[in-house]
Image (cartoon, rainbow, N blue to C red):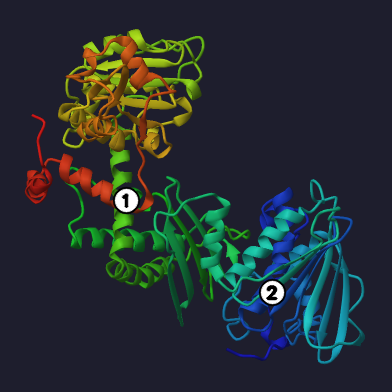
């Protein structure tokens, strides 16, 4: 890379076009976006000096009028000598600010990479400003030239001595061009901070002279952590929880350019990818983002295939792999081909393969070396696939009830509650018509709804989506709760904020509860994650000691009650064969009454997510080998079977 920056480095491609007549061709429009694009053009020229190692500090000032901005860098300073090929013998600075496609970005000797590639930034800003002044510190002197609406107000002048080197550009946009000339300090500050994430070591100072009381007038941005720090801050700002504790990073720096990648997966279903080329945000993506998507898809697929991790009946797509992905791509190349002057999309065809070949082997190796992390990612991918398949098969989401129509399309056997406020409404899924009858009689009709279930429900892990949706019992549950299935699950339409599984306290009851939990896990997972699913704890025994009555959930609790009250009276024990044996008043007192009942919240901790996925797949899936292995290994723990 040449460290010399002289007039001969500047190439004139064509004269100044009538920018003022068609500003949208150059800055995208004359609204707020176009107005701020003027700052980005001048800023990018300063950042280009930093990218190529010639500047370390940029100062941006928004003056008190809110209309005038200055950008100063401590780079080499724009050359001020007469341009060697200009027939008018103008200074190089004047050529840059009055000619389109004139700059140091067209000759590889001046810059290795540059964001202001088109060479039109300085002249466009000049053409669209009522006043623009440039000061250059170079050769121990300070030079100045003034412009108005693209026209020089005299030639370049030496105005005094100058310490160090650098360029200072101050401009006021033309109010006859733009819809409104009022800069947004918050937007400017955000863009400046992003620049410092992309360039480690770069320091940008933002002075906001429009700040009111209580607002920061001076902000300094510097981020040594680069895009890894950017990704973490992005997740925090969006309140996204990572599936894995770490962030994957990859870097490449060779003759083709410099590439930095950081990515992770979150529990959120959306995909967030922020990409930059030579420090310019590419909001519409392009070939660099396509290359990263290719790399992620191939690396994860190869890992899944090598370890044979795809469950039976699951089809993984590229969308499943990328769901929840948050990534940042920071690319520096010599000749980026942007779509349009506003540089929102990268078009270089070769970049796609370059990014993919650089990232894929590193990501794949990282997955093989970090199997716990890889397992969590694969679990996330499998969950996405199952949710997508369930959503595609779902006929339609059941609408949340309203005070007018909350009883429409509900199952006939549902005994609904009077309240239409989900926050106080409870739905009990009850095993058997007999227990359902007792529950209906004993419940609080204002807030408690009862849905009896007949027999053992379908095993959702082994059945196809078609069978699950056709099953009457499961269909009734979906209709009752009202929030839809799979990816169409909308918690805002949920009719009850407590869904309580109420089964007999025996092996059959436990089995039915397990089947229901499998269904909720596979098709209504957001309800579990949001803390809306509970297990009721009905008593198995009634223990009367003297004149006192106690309730025991199991044998050990029964024995504990008897032991702690030994000698206090005659002991009588009643074992309930099922919930249907209980009087409605007893069922309410022991199991339904919020003041006395015991509920277990169904929740999955972060560290147990992979174990949960594996357990349900193995113990509830079609492959009997895993269950046989589990039974043989756990047989010694079964002291007695309730059969």
Q: Is residue 457 left or right of residue 272?
A: left
45 and 435: which one is in front? Answer: 435
Q: Nearer the viewer, residue 481 or 431?
A: 431
Instruction: Give the answer, above or below, for where 447 lies relative to 177.
Output: above
**Alpha carbon distance from label 1 to label 2:** 43 Å
Disc 1 or 2, which lies upstream in sequence?
2
Residue for badge 2: 203
Callout 1–callout 2 Cβ contact below 8 Å: no
Query: For numbered disc 1, what is the local secondary structure?
Result: helix
Look at 84% across and 88% down and name the residue there: 163
Which residue, given by chain and number where applicable, does mark 1 sit on? 608
Q: Quadrant of residue 411?
A: top left
> Residue 282, position in %: x, y?
55, 59
Q: Nearer the viewer, residue 403 or 356?
A: 403
Label 1 CA crowd tier, 10 Å (few <14, some 14–19, many 20+): few
For the N terminus, the image quarter is bottom right
Q: Secondary structure at mark 2?
A: strand
Q: How many marks?
A: 2
Q: Is residue 466 in sight in this rendering?
A: yes
Labels 1, 2: front one: 1
For the C terminus, the image quarter is top left
Give the left or right position of residue 418, taking residue 213 as reference.
left
Residue 295 location, quadrant? bottom left
Going 51% across and 62% down the picture, which residue do you hit? Answer: 346
Q: Residue at x 53, y 69 (%)?
A: 336
């Amino acid at each position: 890379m040449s460290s010399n920056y002289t007039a001969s480095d500047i190439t004139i491609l064509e004269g100044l076009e009538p920018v003022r007549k068609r500003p949208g061709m150059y800055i995208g429009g004359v609204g707020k976006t176009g107005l701020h694009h003027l700052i980005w053009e001048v800023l990018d020229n300063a950042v280009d000096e930093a990218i190529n190692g010639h500047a370390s500090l940029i100062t941006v000032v928004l003056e008190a009028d809110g209309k005038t901005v200055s950008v100063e860098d401590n780079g080499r300073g724009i050359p001020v000598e007469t341009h060697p090929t200009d027939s008018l013998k103008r200074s190089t600075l004047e050529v840059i600010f009055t000619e389109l496609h004139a700059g140091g970005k067209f000759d590889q000797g001046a810059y290795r990479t540059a964001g202001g590639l088109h060479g039109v930034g300085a002249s466009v800003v000049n053409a669209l400003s009522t006043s623009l002044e440039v000061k250059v510190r170079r050769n121990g002197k300070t030079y100045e030239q003034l412009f108005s609406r693209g026209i020089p107000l005299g030639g370049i002048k030496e105005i005094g001595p100058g310490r160090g080197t650098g360029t200072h550009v101050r401009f006021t946009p033309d109010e006859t061009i733009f819809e409104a000339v009022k800069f947004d300090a918050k937007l400017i500050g955000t863009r400046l901070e992003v620049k410092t994430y992309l360039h480690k070591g770069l320091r940008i100072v933002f002075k906001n002279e429009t700040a009111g009381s209580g607002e920061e007038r001076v902000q300094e941005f510097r981020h040594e952590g680069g895009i890894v720090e950017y990704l973490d801050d992005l997740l925090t700002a969006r309140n996204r929880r990572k599936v894995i504790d770490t962030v994957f990073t990859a870097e490449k720096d060779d003759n083709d350019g410099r590439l930095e990648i950081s990515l992770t997966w979150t529990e959120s279903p959306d995909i967030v990818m922020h990409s930059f080329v030579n420090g310019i945000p590419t909001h519409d993506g392009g070939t660099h983002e396509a290359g990263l998507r290719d790399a992620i898809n191939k690396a994860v697929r190869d890992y899944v295939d090598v370890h044979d991790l795809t469950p039976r009946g699951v089809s993984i797509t590229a969308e499943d792999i990328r769901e929840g992905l948050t990534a940042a791509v920071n690319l520096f190349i010599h000749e980026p081909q942007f779509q349009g002057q506003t540089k929102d999309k990268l078009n270089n065809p070769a970049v796609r393969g370059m990014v993919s070949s650089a990232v894929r082997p590193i990501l794949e190796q990282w997955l093989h070396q970090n199997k716990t992390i890889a397992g969590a990612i694969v679990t996330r991918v499998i969950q996405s696939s199952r949710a997508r398949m369930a959503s595609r098969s779902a006929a339609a989401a059941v609408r949340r009830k309203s005070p007018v129509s909350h009883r429409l399309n509900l199952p006939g056997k549902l005994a609904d509650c009077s309240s239409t406020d989900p926050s106080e409404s409870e739905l009990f899924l009850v095993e058997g018509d007999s227990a359902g009858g007792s529950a209906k009689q004993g419940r609080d009709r204002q807030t408690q709804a009862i849905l009896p279930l007949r027999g053992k429900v379908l095993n959702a892990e082994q059945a196809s989506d078609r069978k699950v949706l056709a099953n009457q019992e499961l269909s009734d549950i979906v209709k009752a709760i009202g929030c839809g299935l799979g990816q169409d699950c909308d918690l805002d339409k949920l009719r009850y904020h407590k869904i309580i599984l109420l089964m007999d306290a025996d092996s059959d009851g436990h089995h039915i509860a397990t089947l229901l939990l499998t269904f909720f896990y596979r098709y209504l997972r957001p309800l579990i994650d949001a803390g809306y699913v509970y297990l009721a704890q009905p008593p198995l025994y009634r223990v009367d000691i003297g004149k006192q009555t106690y309730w025991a959930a199991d044998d050990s609790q029964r024995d504990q009650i008897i032991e702690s009250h030994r000698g206090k009276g005659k002991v009588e024990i009643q074992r309930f064969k099922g919930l249907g044996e209980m009087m409605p008043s007893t069922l309410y007192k022991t199991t339904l009454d919020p003041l006395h009942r015991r509920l277990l919240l169904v929740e999955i901790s972060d560290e147990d997510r992979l174990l949960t996925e594996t357990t349900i797949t193995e113990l509830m899936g079609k492959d009997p080998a895993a269950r046989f292995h589990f039974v043989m290994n756990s047989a010694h723990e079964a002291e007695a079977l309730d059969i």
